[in-house]
Amino acid sequence: MTESLNLNILGLVFFTALFLSLFIVPATIVLARKVGAVDVPKDRSSHSTPTTRLGGLGIAASVVLSCLMFLPFNTFAWAFLTGLLVIIVTGLIDDIANIGPRWKFVGQIAAAATFVLLGGGTLVNLGDFLGRGAITLDTFAVPFTIFCMVGGMNAFNLSDGLDGLAGGTATIAAVFFAYFAWHVGAPDLLLVSVALLGAVMGFLRYNSYPAKLFMGDSGSLTLGYVLAAILVSGSQRVGYHLSLATWVMVVALPLLDTLLVMTRRVRYGHSPFLPDRTHLHHRLMALGLAHPAVVAVMYTVMAMFGTMALLLHEFPDWYTFAALCLTAIIVFGGVAGLQHTGIKFNERRRQRAYSTVRQWPLFRKFSRWIVSNTVSISVFLLSLLCLPALFFPLPVLNRHEALALSILAGVVVFYSAHRVQTYKGMLHGSIYISIFVLFFLYNLGADAGGHWSRDYLTTISVLAAVWVLIKILFRKNTVILMTSGSELLMVFLSWFLPFVLFQELHFSATVVEAGRLACLQVLPFMLATKSYFSMQPQGNKWVVGALATAMAMAALRGLVM
């Protein structure tokens, strides 16, 4: 276990990278316009208006500054930061001058070689992924490692095709890498993973659909380099017990997608670096899925690979490798099969089932009642959620915990400072986290409050669930069930805490149970909030203000108790 780092330091690293990113990323818009780094829509583009593409510079700067402040300066740090600067410069030059695949490839090789030759690590032991004994490379370790790192950088570079896609998949990978680094006792890798997590989450505020800016090559190459460096170093350190196959499985989706796309291009006589619309996310869009739905599917598959790596990390290497291959066949083969059958996902087909029932007078009358009372009932439910922060038994918090909770309340306000239409996904995601935190605190204090406390939490959750069900059945308001990529990302992070991380940190059974209950209780309230926004698109100020005030009040009460 990582004894030299505690949660306070990790929280400081995360919030430092997050706030650096939140303030540096929007500044890149002005810089990009001055230097002409603007992405003009093309035939294969998923956006329709010119958009700046230097947002990734904010990610890179946040990671570098956070590492300089907190990362112990050892051989790994020296190699990692030097190589990182090389790839940042490469991506920045390409974003501004469009140097083309050949020179970009040279910069990727230079960055990977810098990391390897300065002592960052090499892939010497590939593990027993074939079931015939461990495979070691010895003399070929250096060129093979450089080749693999370049492949990883290209994978994330080519996966940056939809708003929030590359950033979200990198966030999921950083969460699992951080867990593995903690598990095996690698504080330097843990700090880098947490710094990357904070930097990318700050960037996603501006890049979630519809994106205000793009990360560009300076961002996608940085993501690929950082994750590749963590993978190489983490899988080869002496005394660690996580195989290379386990680390690779976490980032299997972008790696396999890039490998299949390049193989297909070469097969048809095209350059492997020539852009086209054959990536997995393009094929999902061809099936009729909307932009946010495609990103949500990609996040789900990415999280599935990471979860499999988590569950199989104690199994033999060949077992993990076989599971990876089988899952890849199911995922990519399944999408190809759907395309072959000509199936299209279309909302209109689902609407027909309601056409007859919607003509009934009683149905129409009740539907009108629901519309007229949606706002008042949603406000009532949210009031039931926020009021316990004033009167409910709450856990005692230390100074650092109270400060972190107050900062989180401020982050929620900052994320939601614009109109709902502008950052709808991140707004809903930040509200989800707010509700989750409140339920978590309420559950922790429920033991002191007696049975009535838990009964209250159960009752308001059931009421919210019933209200959401009524909305769906009588108003066909299925849009509130449509999960954006940002919302799904927040769901993943909140569920990862009590079901995985809390166990690793050996938290008490009370804390674990409180977190798991919160995961279930938050869902109906999140849907009820989305229902409110469907009727009051500009009502985010009231909701965000109420939730932020409730969290701040909970922090104050927990501190003085």
Image: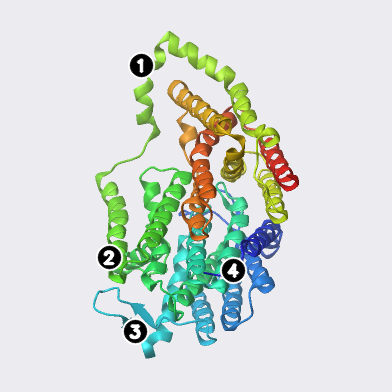
Residue at which label 4 appears: 191
Secondary element at tag 4: helix
Q: CA distance from mark 3 to mark 1?
A: 67 Å
- The amino acid beneath tag 1 is Thr
Q: Residue at x 44, y 76 (%)?
A: 240
The mark lying in front, picked from 4 and 2, is 4
State if disc 1 and disc 4 touch (CB < 8 Å).
no
Viewer-closest of 394 and 226:
394
- The amino acid beneath tag 2 is Ala
The mark lying in front, picked from 3 and 1, is 3
Question: Given the current orientation, which residue lies at the most extreme top position?
Answer: 361
Q: CA distance from mark 1 to mark 2?
A: 50 Å
Residue at which label 3 appears: 136
* Mark nearer the N terminus (4 vs 2): 4
Classify residue 473 as left or right of residue 47.
left
Q: As displayed, is residue 100 above or below residue 284?
A: below
Q: CA distance from mark 4 to mark 2?
A: 31 Å
Residue 337 on image: x %, y %:
26, 50
State if disc 2 and disc 4 touch (CB < 8 Å).
no
Q: As displayed, is residue 143 above or below residue 169?
A: below
Classify residue 199 as left or right of residue 44.
right
Q: Residue at x 42, y 56 (%)?
A: 302
Q: As displayed, is residue 534 above or below residue 344?
A: above
* Mark nearer the N terminus (4 vs 1): 4
* Mark nearer the N terminus (3 vs 1): 3
Residue at which label 1 appears: 356
Q: On the image, which quarter does residue 250 sit in?
A: bottom left
The mark lying in front, picked from 4 and 1, is 4
Viewer-closest of 553 and 537:
553
Residue at which label 2 appears: 322
Q: Residue at x 38, y 91 (%)?
A: 139
| Residue 172 visible in the shown view | yes
